[in-house]
Structure formats: C-alpha cells, structure tokens
Amino acid sequence: GHEGDGKKKGNQRLRQPPTAPAGRRRLQRTIVPGLHRLCTSTREFVIMHSPSKRLITSMSKRLAVSNLQGWADLPDDLLHSIVALLGSSLDLLAFAATCRPWRAAFFSHPSKSTLCFSCPPVLIRQNPIQPPSNGHAKPQRFNLVDPSNTGTNYRCQIREEILQKFYFAGSSYGQLIFFRHRCCLVVDAFSGAEVSPPCLPELNHNVFESYYCSTLTAPLASPNSRLLASTKSSLFDWPVGSDSWSELKLSNVQVRQIVELNGQFIAMDDHMKIYTLQLAPQLGLQDLPIEWCGGKIPSMDSKPFLVVCRDMLLMVCYSLVSLFRGSSFCTLHRLDMSTNPAKWVEMKKLDNWALFVAADIRTPPFSCVNPERWGGRSNCLYYTHHSEPWGVRWLGNEPDLLKDPSASRDLVFGRNMWRYPQSLWVYPSMFYSDRK
C-alpha cells in the first residue's frame, strides 16, 4: 500500500525497500499450515453459539466454504472471525500479507482500531554485537521478536546506512524517526519504506542532545498527519507533505513526551508538568493545572512516563529500592479530569492490563488488555533489557520481591536517551492505516 519509487508529495521523498518475497513466505508459514483447523473451529463456534436464524445462515455458509476452490475465496465474516482469534502482531501481519482478499478483510475488520490494545507489540531487538571479522566491524542487525511466540525471529528491513549514520530520535505509529544534522528520516519499522521531510532550521545544539521527543500526530497516510520534534528551546511542526517546518519557541520548557487521549494531545515536560497541545490554527502549549491526590509528588529520579490505556491516562513512576537485590516499586497514577483542577489519583494495581516500555525515553510505552490471552501476565510491566529480550516487573505500590521472587529482579530497569536505536516496542504501521 505504499506509493511507488521516485514519486513526491510536496517536499516529501519516498524510498521503497527491495521486495522480500522470501521473508513474506516465512511470515505466511506461521499462519497458513494451521489455518484449516482454525477455520473449522471458528465455524463451529459460530454455529454452536448463535440463535436459530443465525444458525441456518452459518450452516449454509459452512457448506459454501467447503466447496470453495482456494483460501482467497473465504467469506469476509469467516476471515473476520479468524482475525479476532489471532493474538499476535506478526500473525496478523502474515494474515494481511497472504493475499489481496485477506488484506481487504483485515482492513475492514470492525474492531481493527482496538488491535493495538488486544495483542502485544513486537520487540525490535539489536542482535548481540559480534567481534570484528578481518578488521571490519560487522553491521548492526535488528530482529523482530514476538512476545506471544518467542520462537519467531524475523529480520528488520531498515537500511544499514541509516543505523550507522543517523541518530535515533523516537518512534510513532510503526515508524522510526531519525535525524542527522538538520536532515530527518522517517522509516517504517517493518517494511523499511522511507519518507524524507524537508530540512529543519539551523540548530545551535549538539544533534544527539537536541531532540528530546519526536512523534507523529497520526499515521503518515492521514491527511492531518504532522511530525513534531522537541528540542531544548523549541517545538517544531511539519505537516506531512508540506515544504517546511513551523517553530514554537519555548521558555524554560523541554517537552519530553506527547500522547493522544480521546482526540486531545497532552505533553509532559522534564519537571512532570502537564500541558494540552494545540495543533491548529497554530501550534501552542497550554498549562494544565493538576493536583496530586494526597499531596505526595513522585521524585523526578523515578523517571516518570505517560501511557494511555484506552480512555485512561496513567503516569508510571519507577523507584529502585535496592540496587543489590533488585527490588523496586512501580507506582501508578491515573489522571482524573472530571474535577477542577484535574487530579493524579494513585492506583493500587492495573487489573487486567500489562504495560510495555523501552529503555529509550523517546519511544512510546504501550498497554495491552487481557495479556493472559497470549500467554502474558496482567498488572505487569514488560521492559527491554540489553542482556535479555525483556524483563517483567509487577505494577503497584509493593516491592517486587514481596510478590514474586522470580520477577526478573536481576534485570535492572532503567531509561535514558540513546544515540542509536536500542531494543524497542512497536506495532506495525498497518495497524493504524485505513489503506487496503
């Protein structure tokens, strides 16, 4: 669903990666062999749990399916049932890559917008660094790892030149964002497709230290998509497809994170202050007065971050109790905007949600509901680590060791800004797109 090579949209240059049919076949092999059994169980479920009128319709469709000549001819309602049963991002990606009718069925699925909450994100993980061979350093390699099936391992399609020469600045809507001096590059984390925005205005800071936060406001293909980049003293805005950036000068504010909650953009600075972000008619930040319930304000040392759980906005604060024993607290606060002023209200636990966070503070955290569906655990924080794919911590206000002595306590959880991509969580950009 990408535009062809050499086409331009405004000053936006598009670059397509080479096709990789072998990689697609490997993805399809994760779903096609067991699909006949899955289709059969899906039809039986529909028939056994439907009223009589629906029963007759389902039975007739079941007989029709048995006479079909190929997988591409399966009816949409059956394909939608299969999509609902898949609990893996890579399986869903393989499903949509199988053929055009299946891809169309994926995009027309009535609950497609909730897929990012119902299955875990994919981990993009750098392979362990190999020693130089014949005096030449081996290239960086990134693989895709699925938490619901750790046996899956696919190669990331990003060009080696990007990983070597550009500085990582964030990720958003399945895209990785890179900068090199004033040049910017937005790269699809799965396909490797690239978009080149126009050059930014001159910066007076070190390139690596300049970009505190970079994010898209919508998928790249959306008509209202913008790319935002926060620096030490400015917030830059590029309407995708336009020829230039606009700049909002900031005074004593460094925007560290931007999230969207129910259509409203919310920003947090380096002192945990919260703002509402206005995109039109011009870029603007408005201070949002918030009180802390009980008056207890977490320390900035806890590296707080914001995460959206459907209609809830949470602030998660991490505190290491003992470096030697690895015991820690992960406290939760929910933003209650029904009061004036709004309040941060502490939560004891997160019930049936799991959170995913990466080591780089510029990558967005994710939330997933009912993680037991794919073999995960509720009320847990999944965090990336350099020595293992990820560690797991309990969420709430009790130390990990009091709850579960085996909760990855030896993998210390820390977040920072990194010059080059580290392991990070991401959903395929296809999950956010309406293209067929």
Image: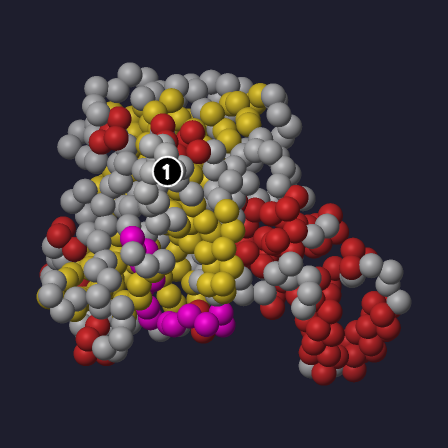
Query: At which x and y percent is residue 33?
Result: 69, 65
Residue 57 percent across, percent down from the top left? 82, 73
- Give the residue at x 54% y 65%: 87
Which residues, given as a range, are shown in magenta? 373-386
- Report the quarter where the C terminus lies: top right
Residue at 58% from the left image edge and 31% from the top image edge: 16
Q: Look at 51% across and 59% down and name the residue there.
A: 152
Left or right: 65, with 30 as reference point: right
71 relative to 103 in the view: left or right = right
Along the line of sight, the residue nearer the viewer: 208 or 18: 18
* Depicted 163 relative to depicted 318: above or below: above
Under mark 1, the amino acid is Ser
Residue 381 image offset from top left, x and y in percent: 31, 64
- At 47% from the left and 59% from the top, the residue drawn is 146
Q: Write down the residue under mark 1.
A: 133
Residue 283 seen in the figure = no
Q: Quadrant of residue 80?
A: bottom right
Taking the magenta stretch, the answer to whether it contains residue 345 is: no
The quarter of the picture where residue 295 lies is bottom left
Packing grade of label 1 (10 A; few <14, some 14-19, many >=20) is: few
Q: Is residue 185 left or right of residue 71?
A: left
The reply to whether residue 436 is in sight is: yes
Number of marks drawn = 1
- From the top left corner, tell me how far across and down residue 366 is, in percent: 39, 55
- Left or right relative to 134: residue 402: left
